[in-house]
């Protein structure tokens, strides 16, 4: 497997997904109202892509993750929402 | 192409899916017990469900010549009620001798609560007492990394649990190393949106090697793809992977893990 082969196989799909991300941010920024921790986490995760170090997918996943170690006292919901509200934004 | 679908919630799929699985080369399916999308109201609800996956689903699969196996538990989403969970766990042993029951699953955590952990530990102890295989569900999205670490600790805390008899499913890039380094099997789930894609699963195979890895669709009542495994096999072929590696990933690896239960026998084997 070469870099050229990976580009041949996946470039168009990745390009499509990047445009979707850009359009999502345009959409969120275009409308009024407050955002929440999910957008902060999203921006932190995006910043990981600019870092040339390997394991970008892992770092993106961790940017959305609960990094605490202890079980929570009780489950008050069943669903996950995609980002952890306890995370302090790294990107201002 | 032959493959095993080791994690599919066939109770929530129409019979056409059995036909399509077999036509695509599926040699066996295994079905962990899971959340129905609503909370069952009593232990009797679970009893009926266990009857469904040990009696009715194998008959439905057999119409297409497909061996159907299953796993039993009270799933993590219904584990906040410890009293209910205790009553369900007490029911499980009467089903363990049924010919298609492979072990306990999909046990695990959902929101990583104390009660969920207590119920997980009950299941782990039951598995240790009966020397059962374990299939673990790891939480969704932001809860996955923490839940995987808590689950690994809970498994390691029971010294009778042998890591090679446990598969920790739904791994992603931030949890796969934790699982493999602890000696467990790791499952990559090809489920749209909330879990892995075929390209990422193949990346993980390339990075970590094929040892102790399997793939599954975890198809259920949500938008999911019962044929995700053969589709991923095609993607592996596009990347130039050998027929031998593909066969190992989609057939021989799941057979290797599941065959640790003597009940897992395929026709002609």
Image (cartoon, rainbow, N blue to C red):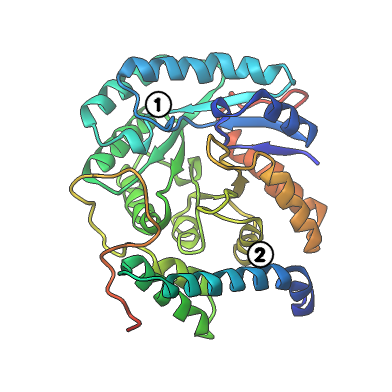
Instruction: Say which residue label 1 marks.
Output: B130
Q: Are marks 1 and 2 in contact (CB under 8 Å)?
A: no
Q: Which element carries disc 2, helix, strand or loop?
A: helix
Q: Is residue B235 left or right of residue B12?
A: right
Q: Quadrant of the N terminus of chain A?
A: bottom right
Residue A34 x %, y %: 30, 69
The part of the image, by quadrant, that contains residue A22 is: bottom right
Q: Of tags 1 and 2, which is closer to the observer? A: 2
Looking at this rendering, what residue extends furthest in the left direction?
A: A73
x 63%, y 31%: residue:
B29
C-alpha span from label 1 to label 2: 36 Å
The part of the image, by quadrant, that contains residue B205 is: bottom right
Instruction: Give the mark nearest the N terminus, 1 or 2.
Output: 1
Q: Which element carries disc 1, helix, strand or loop?
A: helix
Q: Using the image as rendered, state which of residue A86 and residue B92 is in the foreground.
A: A86
Residue A63 x %, y %: 39, 70
Q: From what the image shows, is residue B204 above or below residue B118?
A: below
Residue A11 x %, y %: 72, 73
Task: Give neighbour class at mark 1: few <14, some 14-19, many 20+ (Cα, 10 Å).
Answer: few
x 57%, y 14%: residue:
B56
Q: Using the image as rendered, state which of residue A17 and residue A54 is in the foreground.
A: A17
Residue B93 visible in rendering: no
Instruction: Say which residue label 2 marks.
Output: B206
């Amino acid at each position: 497997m070469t870099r050229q082969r990976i580009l041949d196989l996946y470039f168009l799909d990745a390009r499509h997904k990047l445009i979707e991300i850009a359009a999502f941010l345009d959409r969120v920024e275009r409308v009024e109202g407050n955002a929440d921790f999910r957008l902060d986490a999203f921006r932190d995760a995006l910043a990981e892509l600019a870092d040339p170090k390997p394991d970008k997918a892992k770092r993106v996943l961790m940017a959305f993750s609960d990094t605490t170690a202890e079980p929570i006292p009780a489950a008050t919901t069943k669903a996950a929402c995609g980002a952890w509200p306890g995370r302090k934004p790294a990107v201002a | 192409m032959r493959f095993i679908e080791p994690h599919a919630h066939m109770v929530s799929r129409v019979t056409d899916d059995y036909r399509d699985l077999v036509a695509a080369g599926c040699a066996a399916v295994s079905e962990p017990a899971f959340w129905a999308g609503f909370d069952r109201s009593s232990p009797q609800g679970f009893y009926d469900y266990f009857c469904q996956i040990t009696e009715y689903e194998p008959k439905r699969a057999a119409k297409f010549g497909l061996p159907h196996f299953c796993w039993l538990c009270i799933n993590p989403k219904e584990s906040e009620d410890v009293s209910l969970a205790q009553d369900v766990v007490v029911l499980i042993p009467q089903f363990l001798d049924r010919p298609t029951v492979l072990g306990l699953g999909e046990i695990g955590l959902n929101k990583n609560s104390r009660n969920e952990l207590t119920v997980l530990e009950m299941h782990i102890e039951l598995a240790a007492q009966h020397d059962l295989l374990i299939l673990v569900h790891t939480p969704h999205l932001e809860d996955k990394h923490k839940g995987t670490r808590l689950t690994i600790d809970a498994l390691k805390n029971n010294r009778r649990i042998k890591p090679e008899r446990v598969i920790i499913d739904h791994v992603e890039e931030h949890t796969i190393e934790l699982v493999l380094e602890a000696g467990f099997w790791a499952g990559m789930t090809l489920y749209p949106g909330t879990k892995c894609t075929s390209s990422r699963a193949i990346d993980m195979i390339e990075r970590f090697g094929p040892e102790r890895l399997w793939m599954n669709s975890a198809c259920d009542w949500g938008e999911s793809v019962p044929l995700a495994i053969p589709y991923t096999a095609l993607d592996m072929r596009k990347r130039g992977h050998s027929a031998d590696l593909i066969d190992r990933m989609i057939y021989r690896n799941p057979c290797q893990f599941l065959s640790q239960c003597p009940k897992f026998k395929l026709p002609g084997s």
